[in-house]
Image (tube, rainbow, N blue to C red):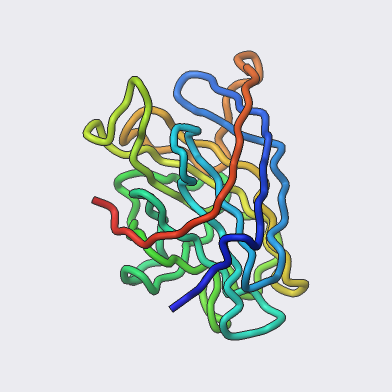
Amino acid sequence: MFKTSLSALALSLLAASTSCGAIVYVGGINVTIPVSSTQYLAIDLDGNRSTPRVAFVDVNTVEINDYDLFIGNIGGESVEFSSGATFGDGYVRRLNSGDAITPYSPTTYAGGNSYLEFEDAGEWHNFTGTAFAGLVFDPVSPNVSPEDGLLHAWVRIAYDDTNNTVTLVDFAYEDTPNAGIIAGAVPEPSAVGLAGLGALAMAFRRQRRA
């Protein structure tokens, strides 16, 4: 059983949000998650929830000076697991730029405690560099509802297993349900518009994708 402190960390992020066609991009985040068992960071992917949509937590349950980091599931979100993983104990797939995140992915999407690395295992173990995690979540907006299907997103993570640092760089999602997205895909520069996005996390709950 993992515990988090509700008063440990309150991060309010203001990022530039850009959209073109169906891709919504949020950049300029660059927030590093501290190595601590009591601190965590969460983001509201589509800006339409009073609670965050997906969270990144360093639980440090095994190694004091290493990341045992998982993506927590909040309100219908799921993450792309490595092949063969099961609900609640799988490792998050480490994606490269250009990889497809779609409903037809060959690996499994599931909610719950989805580890980047735990007990020196997983695709992110011994990795230093920038890579992507693939997510799906249920839309909540005036024009799209969960009944229409799921939205697909990528989150860029700068991960340094040697020096125990992990940074949330930016993210984007496809606002057309079930359309999928390519890791690293952003809107065309000619169509950039600016908006504000706040992100604040204070709670977790485990939930399977409906």
The residue lying at 36 percent from left, 49 percent from top is: 75
Outermost residue toward the right?
163
Q: Is residue 54 above or below residue 18?
A: below
Indicate whether 204 appears above or below 22.
below
Q: Residue pushed farthest top?
A: 190
x, y percent for residue 208: 29, 58
Q: Total of numbered circles in the picture?
A: 0
Q: Nearer the viewer, residue 174 or 16?
A: 16
Q: Is residue 112 above or below residue 30?
A: below
Q: Between 99 and 29, which is closer to the camera in this rendering? A: 29
Where is residue 79? Give x, y as percent.
Answer: 41, 56
Left or right of 37? Residue 70 is: left
Give me the residue at 60% from left, 32% from top.
Answer: 197
**Looking at the image, residue 153 lies above or below residue 42:** above
Q: With 164 as the anchor, is 187 left or right in this view? A: left
Image x and y of residue 34, in percent: 71, 64
Quarter-wise, where is residue 139 in the image? top left
Say which residue appears at 36% left-offset and 70% top-offset: 88
* Quadrant the N terminus occupies: bottom left
Residue 208 vs residue 152, the one in the foreground: 208
Q: Residue at x 49, y 60 (%)?
A: 71
| x, y percent for residue 24 | 52, 28
> In this rendering, would 155 be left or right of 135?
right
Quadrant location of residue 86? bottom left
